[in-house]
Image (cartoon, rainbow, N blue to C red):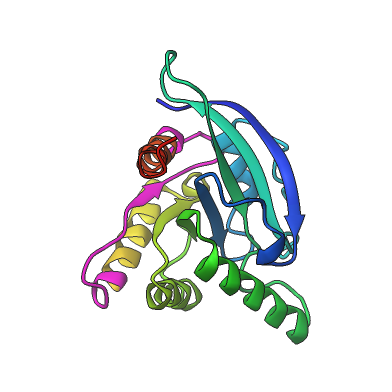
Amino acid sequence: MMNIETAEYLISNPNLEKCPPANKPEYAFIGRSNVGKSSLINMLTNKQKLAKTSNTPGKTQLINHFDIKSKYTTSQKPEHWYLVDLPGYGFAKVSHKQRKQWEKMISDYLKNRENLIMTFVLIDARHKPQTIDLDFIDQLGEWKVPFALVFTKTDKVIQREASANIQAFLQTMQDKWDGLPDHFITSAIKGTGRNKILDYIQQLNEGFYRQHKK
């Protein structure tokens, strides 16, 4: 199991060119506004105030990098990787101009960040499949950006309803996609899914460092 040793805020910036050097594996988290992204990041890193949570959609407005140091076993040398908190898409009350700026910033980052290993797309398990989520996923497919799904807020609804919504989402994807991406079921409050996501990241880290001969 991956053990997070340190998780520190590094930098926030408005464009790809100002991102840190692309010398570590990087994992981006994105979802519709108010999907519970900050709570999930804090749960994964076991640091409750790392990402700022808010009841107001649209608080994340920049590309936010966090430096993570982790170990997989007690004998292994610590590894560093980047966790990236991206602005949400959807219902934030911002101007049309601001929304377009966000869209360009996000698309430039996702399409061109060379060390981006995986994009975790957060989906609110309280709701039936939403067009805005499905459209964003289709866009990632067109851009050939690797992604996995993270279903959030499963503690906010009865289990039967959450399961039905998750299956409906996957079935809707299956009607269009040849295969389904990896997916994780989470609760920031209960810690559900934490170990599975971190172990998944660890496997991807190992592939990155083998390729780059660390």
Taking 40 as reference, is 126 left or right?
Answer: left
Closer to us: 61 or 203: 203
Furthest-bottom residue in this view: 96
**Quadrant of res 19:** bottom right
State the predominant SS element of the stretch in magenta.
loop
Task: Identify the residue shown where x is 57% and y is 73%.
Answer: 107
Task: Say whether residue 191 is magenta.
Answer: yes
In the picture, which quadrant includes the N terminus?
A: top left
Mark yes or no: residue 52 visible: no
Q: Which residues are magenta?
A: 173-195
- In percent of width and height, residue 171 lies at 26, 68
**Quadrant of res 81:** top right
Taking 206 as reference, is 133 left or right?
Answer: right
- In percent of width and height, residue 35 lies at 58, 58
Rendered view: 166 above or below 129? above
**Quadrant of res 149:** bottom left
Task: Identify the residue shown where x is 58% and y is 44%.
Answer: 82
Mark yes or no: residue 96 visible: yes
Rendered view: 165 above or below 163? below
Task: Say whether residue 11 is magenta.
Answer: no
Closer to us: 170 or 46: 46
Q: Give the number of marks.
A: 0
Furthest-front residue in this view: 213
- In percent of width and height, residue 209 lies at 41, 39
